[in-house]
Image: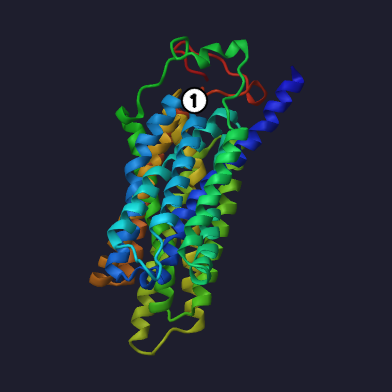
Amino acid sequence: MDQANGRAASHRWKVLGVGVVANASFAATFSGIPATAVWMRPAYHIGTGELGFVLGMLGLGIVLSELPWGLLTDRWGDRRVLMLGLASTMTALVAMVLWCVPSAARVPGPHALAAGFLAIGLLGGSVNGSSGRAVMAWFGPQERGLAMSIRQTAVPAGAGIGALMLPALASWAGFVWVYGALAAMCLVSAIFTVLWVREPDATPSDAAIHNPAGDTPLARSPLRRAEVWLLVGGIAALCMPQVAVIAFASVFLHDFAHAGAATAGVVLAIVQIGAACLRVWSGRWTDRHGNRNVWLRTCVALSVAFFVLLAAATALCAAAAHHAPGLSPGAVIALSVLLVAGGIMASAWHGVAYIELATLAGHGRVGSALAMGNTGAFIAFWIAPSAIPMLLALSGWPVVWLSAAACAALAWPAFAPALSNNAHCSTSPEIIPSAARTPQRPSRSGATV
């Protein structure tokens, strides 16, 4: 029995590894393809307006599909949905290789390209919720924050891989290799899913957990619970300043601070690396102290503070620019430091927030709740890039950064201590292997405390 428990305890790290690889493969897709925009315009003979429309279809597909995939995950299980999603996404990418690659004889039109990207987004939206449910199933309450935070680092890691690899492939070998490489990544992830992802083995005492009709009924649908929607809204709001930095830090440093491309690259790299490290640390720290809401509110408060400081510093630099051309090296460094600090704090909370959302969802509803959170996040990733240029044209950079601070402040009520305490008291009784369990005492309501 101890040997079986040991195997189960070690296997959960394989399941987590599959979740990381699967999320990284799709993050490389939705973040890496836009990185090829410079080569996409001449290859497909499209202008900047058509390029924005085409790339927007990728995000729109994710927004539309996250929730249906999450509901299906709760019905079918994470293994089947993850396999189906990865296989179908790979098929869509192979179809792009066959029919949507520009050549001397034929250049696909923008509508065909948009339809292909929409299909990739619709099918790839399956990865996030299903891999998150697998983490909840295999890790106990005292480890889920760390596990989910590790899984969430796959997004910046995959985005970095895509941003480094795909532009090089597009410039050297063409788009057949861009889509082919992404299809290969999905294939590898699907193979790992087949080999390692399964439901944890249950002991006889776990029968109620496996049987929704038994002593542990399904939780009420998160779609009908105000506290879940509040947390989803907080996730969406706190994604806004994150997107502002990721999408426009290079533009801000180039246009306003007159910094070189190397400076912008270093700033964005530090933001991604710092956020990934802080996500893992915060997952472990909140697991040990049981204080997720404290960490989430700390991220909100520091994000607001850093973006307010950035707005004030930008306004001061803009005023000084009227008297002297250009910014001093010290001013550029100060703006870069504030960008890094704000970007890290606005990106370091994902793992903890998603485990809070999954815990709040309750038994049998993790896939749906995570999909709701992902939908809110990708709506932010869809809206912010469109809103920021309008703000910039109307009011300038100080208002852009002040608006980012205001969006972060909107997340404060979503991470209220009372909400978090209720979530901890009703820890989601997902299927957990006996080796990973911590003793829990049933309450009269059938929940665990």
- Residue 181, how many percent across, how many down? 53, 56
Foreground residue among 199 and 273 = 199
226 left or right, relative to 9? left
- Residue 301, how many percent across, how many down? 43, 52
12 left or right, relative to 118? right
Foreground residue among 361 and 46 = 46
* SS for dot 1: loop
Please state which amino acid type lies under the numbered disc 1: Ser
In this rendering, the answer to whether 359 lies above or below 1 is below
Please give the name of the residue rendered at 45% of the width and 37% of the height, measured from the top-left corner. Answer: 129
Dividing the picture into quadrants, the one containing residue 65 is top left
Please give the name of the residue rendered at 48% of the width and 13% of the height, measured from the top-left corner. Answer: 211
10 Å crowding of disc 1: few (<14), some (14-19), many (20+) = many
Residue, disc 1: 428
- Residue 294, how many percent across, how many down? 49, 42
In this rendering, the answer to whether 211 lies above or below 371 is above
Q: Residue furthest right?
A: 3
